[in-house]
Amino acid sequence: MYLILRATQERIEARIDLLDTNDLLKLKKGWLFDWRKEYEADGNYVYKVITPNNDVIHGLLSVKRKNDHLYVNLLEKSNLNKGKEKAYDNVAGILLAFSCRLAFAYDYDGFVVFDSKTILINHYSKFYGARVLSGQRMYFDTVSAKLLIEKFLL
């Protein structure tokens, strides 16, 4: 999996690992969500996307197993990777694709559910292939999950 350095379009190797307590100490201001709370919540798994050469955290993902799908509690890109001046592309795509990979590993046939901000519904649909389930709730099914994995993780 690769992040794309926007300045040069260079592909930079990325890796996903579970967040640990040492990472929580390194998280500085600038994150919108309370990742310590997510980390400590019962049943949550929090993952980070990093560049292996420097362990910079580019994005975070919190998921929880449900009866028949994986639920994305939160997904957030670091300030370095937000807005028009962001340093890297693919952060959100990698995290969403990883959640789909987990959903296959847990025998959910790739089904992932999440709640989107209203303003991002079209973006998730157009760029990632998510579908609206109801209101702001969106999902990836088996087909869209496989496509997302192929695009961002392989």
Image (cartoon, rainbow, N blue to C red):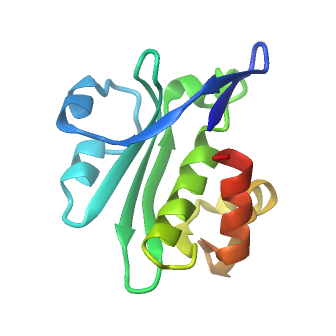
Name, please, the residue furthest toward the bottom.
67
Q: Is residue 82 above or below residue 133?
A: above
In the rendered structure, the answer to whether residue 72 lies left or right of residue 96 reads left
* Depicted 68 relative to depicted 110: above or below: below
Q: Is residue 13 above or below residue 145?
A: above
Specify whether 15 is left or right of 22.
right
**Residue located 67% across and 46% down the image:** 154
> Residue 32: x and y, percent?
41, 40
Residue 151 image point, x, y percent: 74, 50
Query: For the image shown, how many numbered marks are present on the structure?
Result: 0
Q: In the drawing, does residue 72 fall left or right of residue 64?
A: right
- Vertical placement of residue 69 versus 10, above or below: below
Identify the residue shown where x is 53% and y is 54%.
Answer: 98
- Pick the front one: 21 or 77: 21
Q: Residue at x 39, y 61 (%)?
A: 63
Residue 39 at x, y = what percent? Answer: 24, 50
Closer to the camera in the image, 2 or 72: 2
Asked whether 150 or 130 is in front, the reply is: 150
Rendered image quadrant of residue 106: bottom left
Q: Position of residue 138 (x, y in %)?
A: 62, 72
Displayed quadrant of residue 88? top right
Which image quarter holds the N terminus?
top right
